[in-house]
Image (tube, rainbow, N blue to C red):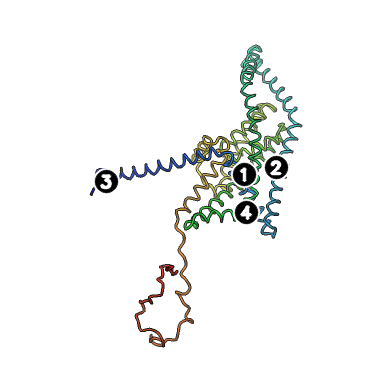
């Protein structure tokens, strides 16, 4: 009777709430320590996460080459070389355009600054030249005060360069082997789950499908976004239009926040190079294009795999950014989508096995109709009795192992 006494003193609703609270606390503790482990292993976790995204993006090419009859090793090498050629070509284009157009940008910014200064003096504000000079001096003093911090940041970046290079090498190795032996690696992982391996397999395949659709759809949407904005910037004659288009492309991988950051930089460059009228035109085109992307391209291409509410995306981005900075914000949404799609598959029971064929014998396998008389040599015993040496059978029709 003692075990029943505490439950009688507590209302059932409060007891359920307490049980839920205990479960949530335990889950929170596990998630916290798991996040701490990943934070300590950022040097390994981040390259592996990026390698999974790259594998999801490049695997269709590798799979197509395999289906064409090419060996996995050759298909993987061709895929990696094609990806490397695209990256090198994009980097060369951006670098060449930046080197040619940067002096022109400086001249245009200086001309725009002089026109703005003249407008501030002769326009409706009627500022004095001494006031403008004072504001410029204050900005220069602020930059000089932060020179030490900027220098320290540059030195720190130089110290981290080796770690970044090592992370890139690790990323390439992981991507290569995932493309080449991904199915074998997954089969090896499944062997460690024993009886629950079918559920884990279904969850993993659902997660991989979601990740592939998300990455491929996001790349397509980002490419369209960067191409349109690049054409607009080039048509306006804005210097550094190619680097800005590439920046918009990469920023589109971070929902909501990324395009705000890249759009602000592109608008400021347009403002400095072409003036306020062109900047307002570019900002209006950017807003319209962004709305079309959110309401047309995203639902059609990415929405089927993700289908997240904007509030959920903002919360996931905030959590990812707090835990791991910009990299965390970049991978937070696909990680949340993968978990959201994989959990239902882990909860579902495996489908029922079909009945074995010998339980439903075809009519031609049955003997002639002799009125139910026992055949010669058959034992005269009831049909529901079994021989002592005959193993029992389960409901699914398969024999139970006997010792």
Alpha carbons under labels 4 and 1: distance apart: 29 Å
Alpha carbons under labels 3 and 2: distance apart: 65 Å
Whether residue 229 is visible to the viewer of this picture, yes or no, is no
How many numbered discs sit on the rendered protein?
4
Q: Which mark is residue 87?
A: 2
Label 3 Cα neighbours within 10 Å, binned few <14 / some 14-19 / many ≥20:
few
Q: Nearer the viewer, mark 4 or mark 2?
A: 4
Whether residue 189 is visible to the viewer of this picture, yes or no, is yes
- Residue at x 41% of width, y 70% of height: 393
Q: Nearer the viewer, mark 1 or mark 3?
A: 3
Q: In this figure, which residue is indicated by the disc labeled 4?
A: 181
Q: Which mark is residue 221?
A: 1
Mark 3 or 2 closer to N-term? 3
Mark 3 or 4 closer to N-term? 3
Q: Nearer the viewer, mark 3 or mark 2?
A: 3
Mark 1 or 2 closer to N-term? 2
| 298 or 360, nearer to the observer | 360
Q: Which mark is residue 7?
A: 3
Alpha carbons under labels 1 and 2: distance apart: 18 Å
Mark 4 or 1 closer to N-term? 4
The answer to whether 177 appears left or right of 21 in the picture is: right
Mark 4 or 2 closer to N-term? 2
Alpha carbons under labels 3 and 4: distance apart: 55 Å
Expressed as whole percent of the image width and height from the top left, the position of residue 70 reads: 70, 58
* Element class at badge 1: helix
* Element class at badge 2: helix
Label 2 Cα neighbours within 10 Å, binned few <14 / some 14-19 / many ≥20:
few
Label 1 Cα neighbours within 10 Å, binned few <14 / some 14-19 / many ≥20:
many
Mark 1 or 3 closer to N-term? 3
Expressed as whole percent of the image width and height from the top left, the position of residue 62 reads: 66, 53
The answer to whether 135 appears left or right of 372 in the picture is: right
């Amino acid at each position: 009777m003692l075990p029943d006494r505490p439950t009688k003193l507590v209302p059932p609703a409060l007891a359920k709430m307490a049980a839920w609270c205990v479960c949530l606390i335990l889950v929170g503790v596990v998630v916290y320590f798991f996040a701490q482990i990943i934070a300590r292993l950022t040097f390994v976790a981040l390259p592996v996460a990026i390698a999974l995204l790259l594998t999801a993006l490049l695997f269709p090419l590798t799979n197509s080459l395999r289906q064409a009859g090419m060996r996995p090793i050759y298909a993987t090498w061709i895929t990696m070389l094609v990806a490397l050629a695209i990256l090198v070509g994009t980097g060369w284009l951006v670098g060449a355009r930046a080197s040619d157009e940067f002096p022109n940008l400086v001249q245009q910014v200086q001309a725009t600054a002089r026109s703005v200064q003249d407008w501030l003096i002769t326009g409706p504000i009627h500022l004095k030249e001494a006031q403008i000079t004072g504001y410029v001096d204050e900005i220069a003093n602020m930059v000089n005060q932060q020179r030490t911090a900027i220098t320290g940041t540059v030195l720190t970046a130089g110290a981290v360069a080796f770690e970044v290079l090592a992370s890139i090498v690790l990323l390439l190795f992981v991507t290569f082997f995932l493309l080449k032996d991904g199915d074998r690696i997954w089969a090896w992982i499944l062997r460690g789950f024993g009886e629950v391996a079918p559920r884990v397999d279904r969850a993993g395949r659902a997660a991989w499908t979601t990740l592939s659709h998300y990455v491929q759809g996001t790349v397509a949407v980002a490419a369209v976004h960067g191409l349109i904005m690049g054409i607009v910037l080039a048509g306006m004659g804005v210097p550094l239009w190619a680097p800005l288009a590439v920046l918009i492309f990469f920023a589109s991988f971070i929902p909501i926040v990324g395009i705000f950051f890249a759009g602000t930089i592109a608008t400021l460059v347009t403002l400095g190079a072409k003036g306020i009228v062109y900047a307002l035109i570019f900002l209006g085109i950017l807003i319209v294009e962004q709305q079309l992307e959110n309401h047309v391209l995203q639902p059609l291409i990415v929405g089927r795999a993700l289908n997240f509410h904007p509030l959920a995306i903002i919360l996931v981005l905030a959590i990812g950014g707090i835990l791991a900075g910009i990299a965390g914000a970049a991978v937070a949404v696909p990680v949340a989508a993968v978990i959201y799609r994989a959990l239902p598959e882990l909860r579902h029971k495996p489908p029922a096995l079909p009945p074995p064929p010998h339980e439903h014998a075809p009519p031609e396998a049955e003997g002639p109709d002799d009125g139910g008389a026992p055949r010669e040599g058959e034992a005269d015993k009831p049909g529901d009795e079994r021989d002592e040496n005959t193993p029992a059978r389960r409901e699914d029709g398969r024999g139970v192992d006997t010792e």
